[in-house]
Image: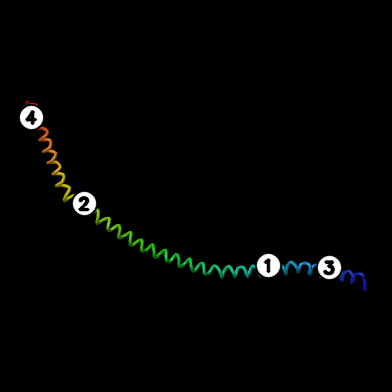
Amino acid sequence: MNVGDIAALIAALVFAVLVGLLAVPLIKLGGVFDEARAAIKEVSAGVIPVLEETTETISEANRQLQRIDVITGDVAEVTGNVSSLVSLVAASIGGPLIRIAGFTAAVRAAIVGGRFAAKATK
């Protein structure tokens, strides 16, 4: 064995130690990746039922909104009918009531005016 062979042997031992030292963090990193994969599977398994329930909830909310839309349309129709009815009642009863009120005011004015005239002549 000469000096070159001894240097090569030392270099090989140093390289083996270096590979051994680098292997430990790589093995630990592999364990971290395994744990991350397991956590992702667990989260995925938990998310799927939540998404299904959310889809069902949104569908039910849409059905309820459609029912409310129908009810709102019916309320708008009833409001229009009540408005027409009020206009009809105001037109058919309001005119005669105004005439009666005017006639009553005229009679009252005539009676009160007659009393003033009678008092003025005395």
The residue indicated by pointer 1 is: 32
| Badge 2 amino acid | Ser
Would you say the residues marked 3 and 2 are in contact, meaning their CB atoms lie under 8 Å apart? no
The residue indicated by pointer 4 is: 118
| Badge 1 amino acid | Val
Tell me which label, 3 or 1, sits earlier in the chain: 3
Tell me which label, 1 or 2, sits earlier in the chain: 1
Q: Distance between the residues labelled 4 and 1?
A: 116 Å
Q: Position of residue 61 (x, y in %)?
A: 42, 63
Q: Position of residue 64 (x, y in %)?
A: 39, 63
The residue at the point 19 percent across, 49 percent down is 90
Residues packed near mark 1 inside 10 Å, few (<14), some (14 to 19) or many (20 plus): few
Q: Which structural element holds mark 2?
A: helix
The residue indicated by pointer 2 is: 87
The residue indicated by pointer 3 is: 14
Query: Horizontal placement of 8 versus 86: left or right?
Result: right
Q: Distance between the residues labelled 4 and 2?
A: 45 Å
